Image (spheres, helix red, strand yellow):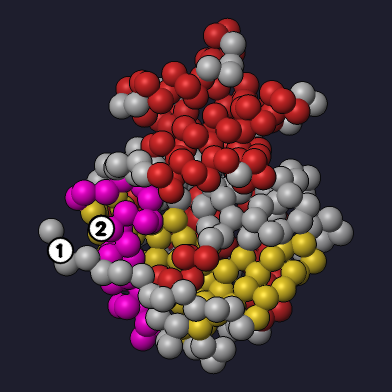
Amino acid sequence: MAESMTLFPIPEPFNTGFLAVDDLHKVYYEESGRSDGKPVLFVHGGPGGGIQTLDRCYFDPNVFRIILFDQRGCGKSTPEAELKNNTTWDLVEDIETLRKHLGVDKWLLFGGSWGSSLCLAYGQVYPDTVKGFILRGIFTLRKQELDWLYQDGACYVFPDFYKDFIAPIPENERGEILQAYYRRLTGDNEEEKHRCAKEYSRWECRTSKLVPDKESIDILENKVWTLQISRIECHYFVNKGWFKTPTYLLDNVDKISHLPCCIVQGRYDMVCPTATAWDLHKRWPNSELCIVPDAGHSSREPGITTMLLKAVDKFKDL
């Protein structure tokens, strides 16, 4: 196994704020590292996952201007768990609005899971603002990807955990599990809504690491977070990301294929299986695909952390 690398010490933000992106939503953002450093945008997962303090630590604070933001409805952004005016294309425009607000010319995009989807979507609309991509746990919202995680795939690896996931849903509705969850997460029964939010989130937390740990489970006690990620994820997934075609993100890779890209993928990723990373790599011949042999989905797993840090180091001269 390759020698592990550790995250950089946590840098304190030198700039934070809320950006009004429409009449309803205010998006939280922060900057750390060097104010005159090389701009990198961390794009979090979910959708609805929000940023964490450690997300700043993949980047050398002496080199990079580290920019993070909470997407609509999650983290510190307001209103929390709001679904109105919350689509992929709203988020794409939020990123561009943030770039202009911060006076960034071009930036490096760094995102995993849903964050990889949003990086691809933004880059395909605004390729001239992007220097390159570091992507992890590739997810493109195709039907087979969603079916694998929620309907007929990961359940064969985690039948004990899947039993808990489907428990809140009557048996006659389990054939379309996401739609059944969405009805409850957007319904008026608050007790049922919070139960479904917790079980939905628990399933994702349990499947995200090769070996689940206490940190993965403790976050389930945060009712705000479980409601944000479950409602917003379901909202995006039942609406198929508002993409024009089922393979939209792969079909439009040609718009960004001239840019450098490093893809980091856990071999045993049960949330976003390796096949999607492989499909992206085939569409993007000059991309670099790094498959981590002893990892699942999480960026916090040692092998994935190491490969992400190595990728960032390679890109520091862009």
Q: Residue furthest bottom?
A: 36
Identify the disc placed on residue 15.
none
Q: Please rate how many residues cluster around mark 2, counting C-alpha atoms within 10 Å: few if below 14, some from 14 to 19, many from 20.
A: many
- Evaluate if marks 2 and 1 touch, with contact meaning CB atoms under 8 Å apart: yes
For this rendering, which residue is in front, 80 or 105?
80
For label 1, the residue is 2
Element type at mark 1: loop
Element type at mark 2: helix
- Residue 38 percent across, percent down from the top left: 48, 85
Residue pictured at 69% horizontal, 65% vertical = 28
Residue pictured at 26% horizontal, 69% vertical = 5
Q: CA distance from mark 2 to mark 1?
A: 8 Å
Q: Residue 184 falls in which quadrant of the image?
A: top right
**Quarter placement of the N terminus:** bottom left
Residue pictured at 82% horizontal, 61% vertical = 22
- Residue 293 percent across, percent down from the top left: 19, 50
Q: Report whether 191 appears left or right of 221.
A: right
**Quarter placement of the C terminus:** bottom left
For this rendering, which residue is in front, 54 or 107?
54
For this rendering, which residue is in front, 172 or 262?
172
- Residue 124 percent across, percent down from the top left: 53, 62
- Tally of numbered tags: 2
For label 2, the residue is 303
Q: Is residue 246 magenta?
A: no
Q: Please rate how many residues cluster around mark 1, counting C-alpha atoms within 10 Å: few if below 14, some from 14 to 19, many from 20.
A: few
Q: Report whether 315 appears left or right of 172.
A: left
